[in-house]
Amino acid sequence: MLTRLRKLIATVATLVAVPAISLAAVAYGATVPMVTVLKPVTENVGSPLRLVFDGQENYYVTDPRKGGISKFSASGQLIGVLKTPAPPQGIALNDKGNLLVSQGDSVVILDQSGREIGRLGSGAGQFRKANGIAVDAAGYVYVVDTLDNNVKVFTATGHFVQAIGCQGGGEGQLSHPTGIAYEKSANQIAVADTQNGRVQFFSATGNFDFVKSIGSLGNQPLQFRMPVGVTFEYDVAGQMTRMYVADMYANTVQVIAPEGSGRFLSSIGSNGAANGQLAVPQDVAFGQINRRLIVVNGNGNLVMFGIDGGANPTPSSTR
């Protein structure tokens, strides 16, 4: 009788333990991705700098040599070029489908026809060098000011709120930041703190407080020589599973699990000119629909990687 009771208790304990293991797998189960090198985009690209996806996974690329913003379909076909009055740098989309484009000392807001309908960057929000841009779920706009060593925050209607960060190497301080991304599952802003060799996270609520830092200067895993772009991958429940960081001087993209101060998973790319290799990458974006990582390559093309079976869609699927 005692033996049977012990077996029953063990069975119940096992059943109770299973959900805990499953929850841990969901929260911390990021694995090394299966990466496939896909056909790159080489036509209609001049000097690409940054890119952003829309809801249909068309993508917009800032390209000064082409005179503005090149819009591509999900399959890589050029849809058109929106001319900008000054060389473009960073780019983001707001919930109205308008484009926010940094141009040195300002950020212009363009509709889908390329018409300027607004501008950020006057008075208290003036920029020294506007760079990467992100928009959060509440519509707040975050603009990296590389030379001012901070991130300037604006409301959805364009009113300046405050600056995040200041020059330095301590927590919450920045040194020549460049790229930025919104991490929706934790409602945080991730900033490529370029010369400090790390990615810093700030809350997207309240006073935009410092949350944590991932990485440091160096050549080892979880170290960066010059991080310039960051993007996130999510599971079907909307939880962030992997982050990807483009390192300009290492010519790679590091894949990192998000828990704590980060867990290195793998590197994508290597130095070179062949497809799948990188030369001074400028930015990176992950497309959830087709499960592709797009890297803006410094040698003038867009390098495509399929993640865990992701692929380039055929032209007919995007028409």
Image (spheres, grey):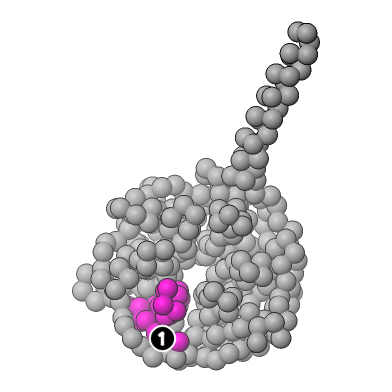
- Quick check: is 102 in the magenta stretch? yes
At 55% from the left and 53% from the top, the residue drawn is 239
x, y percent for residue 224: 55, 55
Between residues 90 and 14, which one lies in front from this camera angle?
14
User: Most extreme residue toward the front, as rendered?
Assistant: 1
Q: Is residue 146 something that shows in the picture?
A: no
**Image quarter of residue 317:** bottom right
- Which range is magenta? 91-112
Between residues 124 and 235, which one lies in front from this camera angle?
235
x, y percent for residue 54: 53, 75
In the figure, 43 relative to 152: above or below?
below
**Image quarter of residue 298:** bottom right
Between residues 27 and 172, which one lies in front from this camera angle?
27
Element marked by disc 1: loop
User: Most extreme residue toward the top, as rendered?
Assistant: 2
In the figure, 251 relative to 215: above or below?
below
At 62% from the left and 35% from the top, the residue drawn is 20
x, y percent for residue 227: 52, 61
At 70% from the left and 52% from the top, the residue drawn is 32
Q: Amino acid at mark 1?
A: Asp
Which residue in the protein does label 1 denote? 111
At 60% from the left and 49% from the top, the residue drawn is 257
- Quick check: is 137 in the magenta stretch? no
Between residues 164 and 251, which one lies in front from this camera angle?
164
